[in-house]
Amino acid sequence: MIVPPREPVLSCRSNTYPKGFYCSWHLPTPTYIPNTFNVTVLHGSKIMVCEKDPALKNRCHIRYMHLFSTIKYKVSISVSNALGHNTTAITFDEFTIVKPDPPENVVARPVPSNPRRLEVTWQTPSTWPDPESFPLKFFLRYRPLILDQWQHVELSDGTAHTITDAYAGKEYIIQVAAKDNEIGTWSDWSVAAHATPWTEEPRHLTTEAQAPETTTSTTSSLAPPPTTKICDPGELGSGGGPSIPFLTSVPITLALAAAAATANNLLIW
């Protein structure tokens, strides 16, 4: 069903301070017919130019003409269609709408040999035009995936921080936000980085079953003792027939001779 427009929702923000700010708007409910928007920006009594965004049709950009001005800005928007019209307006100080974009390229890495540390680095948002003259401070939050409670660290400067109280071996999620040092509000949270603290690689113990088999071959350098041949009958000039070693007859002959000598000695005595 086509309806007249309701009061537009209007907001303004400076993510490129001190260059300028932008304002964006939308209708809380669709009208289902074409609508026409008209934006007016006043700085005191001076009308400011609001340049249309080339990519987003419901956004326009305003350049700051006077920095650190105490004069308030007033932005009005009216919307109309075939069934009616509506309008809204907001008034604000320059410094209250400063809100940087989130930090970029957030990276977390384990620290070798330190099971409770994570090194986190990030970059200033590329849309922030002059970080030297208008430095940012940062807010870091982190937690292990197994817990819901965040831990927080606020950093006055720098784009790096070392977490020293991480749980060993647990995966962490880390995000960073940014804010001008003096004015404005915190940015949205950055894209989350994930990292797990360093863990020692398990040592591989060699078991008996895993031990390689070693075969040792021992070769004796000693040859079997030679057989001493005393004599055989063939060498003594005996006739044919099998050669019987003469070795067995020698002890018997010697034993009989010794017995005869002993008997003679007894008879003489």
Image (cartoon, rainbow, N blue to C red):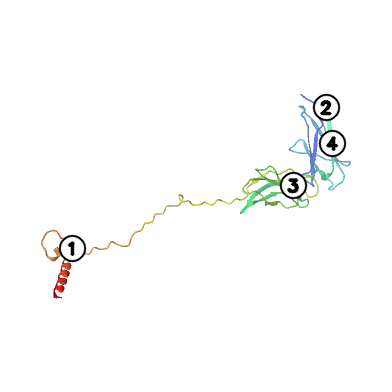
Identify the residue at the far bottom of this view.
Answer: 269
Position above or below: 111 against 221: above
Q: Earlier in the sequence, mark 3 or mark 1?
A: 3
Mark 1: give few (<14), some (14-19) or many (20+) Cα within 10 Å: few
In front of the other: 121 or 43 = 121
Q: Nearer the viewer, mark 3 or mark 1?
A: 1
Q: Residue at x 76, y 47 (%)?
A: 179
Q: Which mark is residue 248?
A: 1
Q: Earlier in the sequence, mark 1 or mark 2?
A: 2
Mark 3: give few (<14), some (14-19) or many (20+) Cα within 10 Å: many
Q: Secondary structure at mark 4?
A: strand
Residue on which disc 4 sits: 89
Q: Nearer the viewer, mark 2 or mark 4?
A: 4
Residue 229 quadrant: bottom left
Identify the residue at the far right of this view.
Answer: 45
Q: Earlier in the sequence, mark 1 or mark 4?
A: 4
Q: Report the Cα–Cα distance between label 1 and label 2.
A: 146 Å
- Left or right, 129 with reference to 233: right
Q: Report the Cα–Cα distance between label 2 and label 3.
A: 42 Å
Q: Earlier in the sequence, mark 2 or mark 3?
A: 2
Residue on which disc 3 sits: 178
